[in-house]
Image: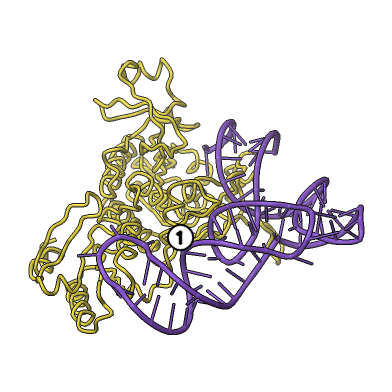
Chain colours: A yellow, B purple
Amino acid sequence: MRQSTLFTKTRKEAPSDEVSKNAQLLIRAGYIHKEMAGAYVYLPLGLRVFNNIIEVIRREMNALGGQEVVMTALQDPEVWKVSGRWNDDIVDIWFKSQLKAGGEIGFGNTHEEPLTKLMTQYIASYKDLPKYVYQFQTKFRNEIRAKSGIMRTREFVMKDLYSFSRNEEEFREFYERCADAYLNIFKTVGLGEVTYRTFASGGSFSKFSDEFQTVSDAGEDIIYIDEEKGIALNEEVKTPEVLHDLKIDEGKLVTKKSIEVGNIFPLGTKYSAALGLTYKNESGEDVPAVMGSYGIGPGRLMGTIVEVLSDEKGIVWPESVAPYQVHLIGLNVDDPEIREWTDGIYESLTARGVTVLYDDRDLRAGEKFADADLLGMPYRVVASKRAKEEGLFEVVQRKNGEVEKMDEGKLLGFFTPDPED
RNA sequence: CGGGGCGUAGUAUACCGGUAGUACGUCUGGUUUGGGACCAGAUAGACCGAGUUCGAUUCUCGGCGCCCCGACCA
């Protein structure tokens, strides 16, 4: 991508109506635009990050045997009335509207009911189970107070997977595999060191659910971490009984603020029983499927990455989600000879499959470097008159500032993905 | 939803009961060119409505919007 053609621009100053680091940096860098409180536009660079995060999640979900669908954002009240969750006293964040033709409609804030109903069409026998179905879908939640930039919005995409199993044991087996997949996801996007599987309230379905909490001062939650065991518990479940049950020594717990980046929880047979998702077992009896629900918000994850990994100069994207691997900085591009040469470098890299943001704008070096720091691509490569004369490119890692000089051959090899991968 | 704060060019801000200034941006021209350069010129603004007043961007009321703390987050 030639930066000269990008319609977004960076800003020196943070917007006055945002305090959170994620929103300030993402807006300054032109990744997102605030449409209104709790609703953000993903601009070209931001969308690339967003899609990369989705791809990381999708790979893990597919590896678990998940099958992807897209449900509807518009929802029929009927299934919700069956479960009792159409009631505003039960679920207070509904966006609801009227159909012109008459009747009510809801904007989906989650999808347990419609998906469970859907699956009754396809699950009849124990031979049809287990099944794992997921989607990336826009959710609408009429939050009383949106806050923290893209961390808590009224409209957001969520990856929600629902598991349908024959029994508790089969459910647990998947649940644990999914927990591992979640840890892989957070590790892949660079948050592995600071993200903990966390015991949390299980609601009405089970004693616990599991949250994935990333340590950050920007977080809304308080967790207690047992570093040795590598687990944590949410303050909402920190009671003497729970500590005893989990064999956790209270003295070893460290208190941290954290961001909930994922949540998985057992649903039991609540929805399957209510909506008639039963199957015939080997004895010919009708049995409700045992369900689980597994959520991750890609947008919140993007915000968390910014909160945790950015520095005073700007954003630092891990390679797994960066919009481009390389930020090629073209200096002295007002000289046609240098420009042509630098264009050639850009084309060589992209032809080899390297994703490159090429700063071909005729600006001073300082401005370009400042933009590169703010935008946060993993590698910055400088092409300039000096580089051309020396035959050496300066390659700088954004995350640690390490500099390496390499010639063109090495440069191309350095960034070209290994065909074996 | 309780409490607090705020609303001025594209962005960030200032002043003022007598119609608004600065910086950045943008545009023109020139000098520059490896860490947000300099000179000259230009561009562009008071959230909406009502009231008080000779006069309101300023004061009052209402609305709308935004932020923060708390509550909430199935």
The spot of residue A20 in percent (x, y) is 47, 46
Dot 1 amino acid type: Ile
| Residue in the image at 34% along x and 55% along y | A53
Res. A70 image quadrant: bottom left
Report if residue A135 is visible in the image.
Answer: yes
Between residues A312 and A103, which one lies in front from this camera angle? Answer: A312
Q: Secondary structure at mark 1?
A: strand
Relative to residue A322, is residue B53 drawn left or right?
right
The spot of residue A401 in percent (x, y) is 21, 52
Give the chain of mark 1: A
Q: Is residue B20 above or below residue A205?
A: below
Report if residue A78 is visible in the image.
Answer: no
Relative to residue A191, is residue A294 drawn left or right?
right
| Residue in the image at 42% along x and 29% along y | A234
Q: Is residue A168 above or below residue A243?
A: below
Between residues A320 and A156, which one lies in front from this camera angle? Answer: A320
Between residues A372 and A36, which one lies in front from this camera angle? Answer: A372
Between residues A113 and A367, which one lies in front from this camera angle? Answer: A367
The spot of residue A261 in percent (x, y) is 39, 43
Q: Residue under label 1, please give it.
A: A32
Quarter of the picture holding the C terminus of chain A: bottom left
